[in-house]
Amino acid sequence: MTMNTQKRKKRLNMKDKYKHMTRLGWDTTYQDMDDVFPKDKFEGIVIHDWEGWEDPFRMTMDSYWKYQGEKDKKLYAIIDAFAQNNGQKNITDARYVSALKLFLTGVSPLEYQAHRGFADIARNFRGDGPRVACQMQAIDELRHVQTQVHTLSHYNKYFNGFSEFAHWHDRVWYLSVPKSFFDDARTAGPFEFMIAIGFSFEYVLTNLLFVPFMSGAAFNGDMATVTFGFSAQSDEARHMTLGLQAIKFLLEQDPANVPIVQGWIDKWTWRGYKVLGLVSMMMDYMLPESPQSWKEAWELYFEENTIALFKDLERYGITVPDCAATVSAEKDHLSHQIWMTFYTHAAAAPFHTWLPDEKKMDWLSEKYPDTFDKYYRPVYEHWGKLEKEGKRYYSEMLPQLCQTCQIPMLYTEVEAGKPTQIAHRQTKFNSERFHFCSDHCKDIFENEPEKYVQSWLPVHQIFQGNCGGSTLPEVLKWYKVEFGQDNLDYVGSPDQKMWKEWKGEE
Amino acid sequence: MSKVFLALQAIEESRAIIEAIIKDNPDVEVENQTAMTKVSAEGKLVINAPTVSDLIGREWDPQELQLVLITLAGNVDEDYDHFTIYWDN
Amino acid sequence: MAIITVGEYPLNMMDSVDKFHGNQLVYVGWDNHRLINSAMTFPLPPEMPFGALVSEVMPSCYKDHPDFEKVNFEDGSVLWSLNGESFTPDFSKSLIENGVDHKSLIRFDTPNLKGLNGVGM
């Protein structure tokens, strides 16, 4: 049987409908347009014709509410079913829950920041097409943080490490990494924000954040996270398209925009990659069942897919981000170096870490044939001996942090062929010394030093006396991290005790 | 030529869309992964709304794709009768 | 001013030495001993003797590495650098007299000690 689709009602084509419903702006006559839109010229970006803006999805408010409403209905039905059926008992192992703690404290607050940021640029672009698109994205991002908090609130009923996520995001040492990433974007101008988040994060890097978490959830029995993940991802396709459209629009408007945009692509791909270090560790160490290694994800989502994207942008004079070689070189080492740091400083973080078991180490050997057995298995075996002696290793030292990315300076000179030598870079500004993990972070600082001298570095703030005191218990109190509940190894934790009771073990 | 791809949730609403893609794009590759189906092609991939509508027995609007889409790679072009992704290189 | 701004942009040095209650920050790192994840940060009086840094502060960190008990700080086998330049510290003089100022990075290298698995971990 054939549907006679020629019987479709006659209507405006999608392009024209979109124009009529989004081009509702006007040029003001009683106030100067530059006073109404005071922030869209100072960055040096030149726009000759805002009408050149297109939304390939042709989203208008009527279709927006309709489809978003449908997504929410489906999503909440599944979240409710998960809760009603004690879905938290069907995950592979309670170690997995630490990946969710990392998500709620490190990623969900960024969704909220994205909401604020897109709302802000929706106000500040003088073109009405992008204003509508950015408003929609702002509402999407708010929906994301709400659905994430809602979903993970179910886990909060049973597991530690969720309850103070907003407080931790603002104070706990490693969370200054994602927080400062977005603070940097939010305090930039509207065009930089669009390229930083709309393009570099939402297009270039988005698959490296969401697919790992959602596949990880699917492989480990976490139906709730799979559901909110896919629900958010369906918005992401529009976000990606917005980002790509934005960059092509800027590059087509004026050749003066090309070097400015290239500089932002270089900066923000690097900054985004740095934050994604947390994801690399999650993929390789925190999933009892691992769908994919960080290295595999990078090779697929960046080296394959993104290269196709940059081929498209070549015609404008845009090149692959200058950090691509560094990231590629580091892919055999990144997750291991980061997990080592979190294992070491586990007393100060509100999620659990643990030693990889034999099965996991064999998987890591297979995925990292050139590096795991040579450099990292010996470390875990060394710490494993200490654990067996009842001396699970915890360091009370405070690491040197990079001034720009704020990550402990745990990265090594991999590109120079020295993967066990910590990378040190340094510069002086206003007679003070500043340290960096890499040339890329140093360059970012030197391009805008007045911005990065303001980094709120957790280690320095502790030593200034701004974090509740100088001892670990005092700092944890200021963090609102409960000792022996939220922190330390998974082994011996209340989470583990409860899991074993559920499973009738021990 | 670079590859374009679409990843859709592996659920009921996606089945007809994937069938339509296979019908109208001869060289498409379909990969079934956990919870998602990935379809990729060289340079361009088209979803024709009439093809999907015929398969499901009602009028299908390409904007409904948003309910099942996970991610994509490529430039987007959409109208009432099609959803296309493509690279320009 | 390198940064492009709308209006005035104050210079706010978050980590100037006056904020550390008489201490200065000193970072110490051990080359090619990656078991220790990074250089570590220490708030120290500028007048602290360099020798006290070595005998009291550094062990609190490096005792975590099996190689540390084999390090001999007296026989010249340890190579030092200060802010990227090689230097020979005078253990009897203070940090500041040795040129170790606020947010200085001290690195030490022990070429004969090869770390875990002999590969620099």
Image (tube, coloured by chain):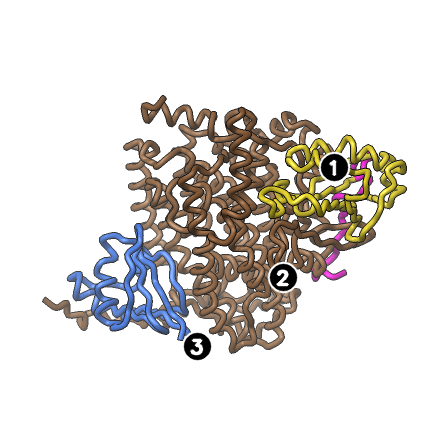
Say which residue appears at 68% left-offset and 39% top-offset. Answer: A459
- Identify the subunit bearing mark 1: C
Sort mark 2 into few (<14), some (14-19) or many (20+) by Cα contacts within 10 Å: some
Sort mark 3 into few (<14), some (14-19) or many (20+) by Cα contacts within 10 Å: some
The tag on residue C42 is 1
**Residue B65 spot, x, y in % from top left:** 30, 60
Magenta region includes residue C4: yes
- Identify the subunit bearing mark 2: A
Q: Is residue B56 left or right of residue C58?
A: left
The tag on residue A39 is 2
**What residue does disc 3 label?**
B89
Say which residue appears at 47% left-offset and 63% top-offset. Answer: A303
Residue A111 makes an appearance in the image: no
Q: Nearer the viewer, mark 2 or mark 1?
A: 1
Q: Secondary structure at mark 3?
A: loop
Residue A54 makes an appearance in the image: yes
Q: Is residue A245 left or right of residue A76?
A: right
- Identify the subunit bearing mark 3: B
Disc 2 and disc 1 on one polypeptide chain: no
Give the dominant element type of the magenta stretch: helix, strand or loop.
Answer: loop
Which amino acid type is shown beneath numbered disc 3?
Asn
Q: Colour of chain A?
A: brown
Which chain is displayed in blue in the rendered image?
B
**Residue A308 spot, x, y in % from top left:** 45, 69
Sort mark 1 into few (<14), some (14-19) or many (20+) by Cα contacts within 10 Å: many
Magenta region includes residue A152: no
